[in-house]
Amino acid sequence: MNEEPGRRTAAAGATSVARNAFWRFLEISGAEIISFGFMVLLARILAPADFGVIAMATGMILIAQSVVFHGFAEQAIQIETLDRRAFNTLLWSNLLVGFLLCSILAIGAFPLSALTGEPVLGPVLMTLSIVLPIMSIAGIYQARLRREMRFFGLTCRALLAVATAGSVGFVFAILGFGVWSLVAMQITHATMGCLVLLFFSGWQPGFSVSIDLLRRVAPSSFHLASSFLADTTGRYLVPLLLGVFLPAGAVGLYFVANRLMNSLSMLTFMSVNELCLPVLARVRDDRLRFDEAVHTTIRITTLFCLPAFAGLALIADPAVPLLFGEGWHDAVPPLRILAALGIFPAWAAITAQILVAVGRPERALRLNLMIAAALVILELILAGFGLRAAVAGIALAYLSVLPAAWIDLRQEAKLDMRRLVLDQAPMMAAVLVMALAVVGVESMLVQGAPWLRLFAMLVTGAATYTLAFYLLAPNFARQILRQLATAILPSRPAVL
């Protein structure tokens, strides 16, 4: 029997993940570079306490945003037919949810301000809550473009929104508005992003809706939104919990460390994480293609995330003072802790998406609830002992649920766990070699200029990891290169 068609179809899911991850990477990398540049500028103008207040307020906004971006919005990707009536139903339902969340945050703003002892938090959070109805509209239009794999519009949205918002925030900061410059930046980002999505989508909302469709999708939307809400609540409630025990300046140090982690995450596993749901959902009924796509998704996550996070931990000391100034040097220890164990949140996020793709959103919800509970409990216990202890608690929370996550993969996705573990071994060994090389270079240049140390560590780390990985897993390395070539040159046939 000719097995060539079977091999081609088995690789189709994996190649699709790689191709779309490449284009998604281009979108995210541009936005993150611009956003990071403005963050560096603002950090040299504003105080850590300003970032601490905005971290607490933005954390609450991001928790609410997870509902409007992942409830009805995910249904816009997964339902079989997204006609105009279905689109209108999801849009107006999501907008109603956005207004409800806006009202809840506006009412709770001042009680949260009293809880943390930061008077400015109340008006800041109340003002920021107005972005939620805007985000609820953007969530549906963004989902439609994702469904159709129209990444050009999404790329333009990301770049224009970040550039406009950063410019507004920078001008406000120069004029002396302090924390309100960060508020203006957030509102501008949400508004501009929504306008660009409306422009590229071309669909004007109407009032023809389907109650039957709403009844069908509401339970699944609730499960999806609850799953993401649990995940984001654990992560984004951390600044508020820190604010209860620590001053705003310490929360600001955590914010900068976590912001660096988020930037790196956006450039690595979040690219794959966002794409794996629509791709895996399409091949769910083909066992061979699905298994291959899942294994490749996890391997790609480890391939890029593990060295990126480990490298950030290694270069934290010269990098943070160089970028933000000596006033931010105390952000180095929390950054090192977050980065050293950053692969665990990446694995947990990918696992949750895979569980959703196999039609088990309740399992993803359970996993994210476990993470959220572990985060809250550990932060309540450890935050009183200082910032380093609190950050260590974040890493321990993800590590504690990893066994349950992999058990779910074995039971629900029917994956070969032995293969899954062995797939990660070459990347782990390559990272160990990279770490030894980088530490050696740093020790030789300990008296050198900080920029020289940083440059030498970056070059050494990248070269060492690439070479070690190629030597340890040559077949997978060549497969990744071929898939990237296919993504860049789609007219070329994939070669296995």
Image: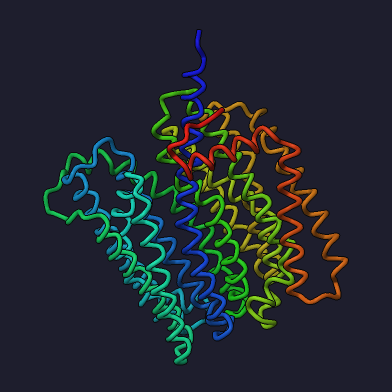
Against 169, residue 278 (above or below) is above
Q: Residue sitting at 36 percent across and 45 percent down?
A: 149
Of 116 and 295, nearer the camera is 295
Q: Which residue of the protein is positioned furthest toward the bottom in this rendering?
A: 175
Q: Residue at x 38, y 70 (%)?
A: 189
Q: Position of residue 281 (x, y in %)?
A: 40, 35
Instruction: Give the quadrant of residue 197.
Output: bottom left
In the image: residue 378, left or right of residue 63: right
Left or right of 335, for residue 61? left
The relative height of residue 192 versus residue 474 in the rendered view (above or below) is: below
Asked if residue 426 lies left or right of residue 107, the reply is: right
Quarter of the view holding residue 62: bottom left
Is residue 55 positioned above or below 357 on the image? below
In the image, residue 139 lies at what x, y percent? 33, 56
Name above or below for residue 327 compared with residue 452.
below
- Counting from the top left corner in percent of width and height, residue 161 is at 38, 68
One can see residue 379 in this view: yes
